[in-house]
């Protein structure tokens, strides 16, 4: 299959990432018109012929999450009605992923609802990265390609391989991810036990791991208000850490998050452009996932395996 049979569309959530993906692949983004009526209803028109093509729609569901999700569903419906051969929803960041189970009475499983909506709209496949809960792949009755940002971070973090850096999970639930990073870089690891005291406030209660006189790398999949990172960084410093950096796949930062970063509790925040990130003159390093996503899209289009994309380079 040739690139000419591939069409890449973007919603308004992260058009810069779509442009980078297209630059890597060597094509142009498909022309799309997206407007909002005075009552904020979304209107979409695909301005090119996509009949019989392999369509990829790049749209993370970052804030405003509901608007971007609805926009994605409408784009999928438009592509289906325009007789696209196959439609792949490319969600570098899959919103609502934290609502993946019924942990209280009378609450929804919204991650499953979003999966149902994508299927109903007409998507044939999903390409995503670092889901908050990997089991969400099982919510879909269609193929899901789940990529990992660790292959992007590895190049940047390689300088710390075999050093005295300690990889720390800011909560117990991230132990599996932290273990993978520690194995990737041949480092020791630990975790912080936390207690949530409010919607945006967290208290770190215990630290497991030796950080005294050593630099620390906090690893997490998502941060919004940076409360969990701040609490983990504080307890690490109280236990003698010389510096604290954080590596986060999706920095969906709100004003509270930027405000906390301004206090300087982190020496560096390393993240990706899965969602738009404005460094705000803060120590934020943004790594591009365009090559990873672009290569996966090419392989999907050409019916090739994406397995090698999970391999760490050079090891």
Image: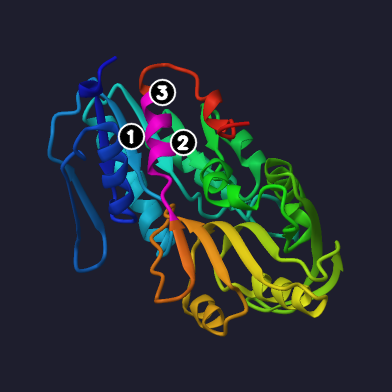
Q: Is residue 209 left or right of residue 281?
A: right
Q: Is residue 245 left or right of residue 261?
A: right
**For mark 1, what is the residue?**
56
Q: Earlier in the sequence, mark 2 or mark 3?
A: 2
Image x and y of residue 196, in percent: 74, 73
Residue 294 is one of the magenta-drawn residues: yes
Please name which of the two marks, 3 or 1, marks the residue nearer to the observer: 3
Query: What element does badge 3 sit on?
Result: helix
| Crowd rating for badge 1 (residues with CA inside 10 Å; few <14, some 14–19, many 20+) | many
Query: What element does badge 2 sit on?
Result: strand
- Residue 127's label in the rendered image is 2
| Crowd rating for badge 3 (residues with CA inside 10 Å; few <14, some 14–19, many 20+) | few
The one nearer the camera, 106 or 84, is: 84
Task: Tell me where residue 208 sits by quadrant.
Answer: bottom right
The residue under the point 39% across, 39% down is 291
Position of the N terminus, as image quadrant, is: top left
Image coloring type: rainbow
The residue under the point 63% across, 77% down is 200
Viewer can see residue 49: yes
The residue under the point 71% across, 66% down is 215
Residue 291 is one of the magenta-drawn residues: yes
Instruction: State how far apart marks 3 and 1 are (Cα).
Output: 12 Å
Q: Main secondary structure of the magenta part?
A: helix
Do the residues under discs 2 and 1 have CB atoms within 8 angstroms?
yes
Image x and y of residue 54, in percent: 30, 25
**For mark 3, what is the residue?**
299
Viewer can see residue 122: no
Task: Tell me where residue 302 sits by quadrant.
Answer: top left
Q: Earlier in the sequence, mark 3 or mark 1?
A: 1
Instruction: State how far apart marks 2 and 3 are (Cα).
Output: 12 Å
Q: What are the residue bounds of the magenta stretch?
A: 287-298
């Amino acid at each position: 299959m040739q690139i000419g049979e591939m069409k890449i569309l973007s919603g308004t959530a992260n058009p810069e990432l779509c442009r980078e993906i297209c630059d890597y692949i060597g094509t142009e983004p498909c022309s799309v018109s997206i407007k909002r009526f005075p009552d904020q209803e979304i209107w979409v028109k695909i301005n090119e012929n996509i009949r019989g093509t392999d369509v990829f729609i790049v749209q993370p569901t970052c804030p405003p999450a509901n608007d971007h999700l609805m926009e994605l569903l409408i784009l999928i419906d438009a592509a289906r009605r325009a007789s696209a051969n196959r439609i792949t929803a490319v969600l570098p960041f899959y919103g609502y992923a934290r609502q993946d189970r019924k942990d209280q009475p009378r609450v929804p499983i919204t991650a499953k609802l979003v999966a149902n909506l994508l299927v109903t709209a007409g998507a044939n496949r999903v390409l995503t990265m670092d889901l908050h809960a990997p089991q969400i792949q099982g919510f879909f009755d269609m193929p899901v390609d789940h990529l990992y940002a660790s292959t992007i971070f590895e190049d940047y973090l390689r300088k710390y391989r075999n050093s005295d850096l300690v990889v720390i999970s800011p909560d117990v639930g991230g132990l599996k991810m932290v273990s993978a990073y520690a194995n990737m870089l041949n480092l020791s690891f630990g975790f912080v036990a936390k207690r949530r005291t409010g919607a945006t406030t967290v208290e770190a209660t215990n630290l497991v791991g030796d950080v005294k006189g050593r630099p620390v790398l906090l690893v997490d999949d998502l941060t919004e208000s940076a409360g969990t990172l701040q609490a983990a960084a504080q307890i690490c410093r109280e236990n003698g850490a010389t510096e604290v950096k954080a590596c986060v796949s999706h920095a969906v930062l709100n004003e509270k998050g930027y405000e906390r970063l301004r206090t300087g509790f982190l020496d560096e925040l390393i993240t990706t452009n899965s969602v738009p990130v404005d460094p705000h003159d803060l120590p934020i390093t943004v790594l591009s996932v365009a090559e990873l996503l672009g290569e996966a899209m090419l392989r999907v289009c050409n019916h090739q395996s994406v397995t090698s994309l999970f391999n760490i380079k050079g090891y």
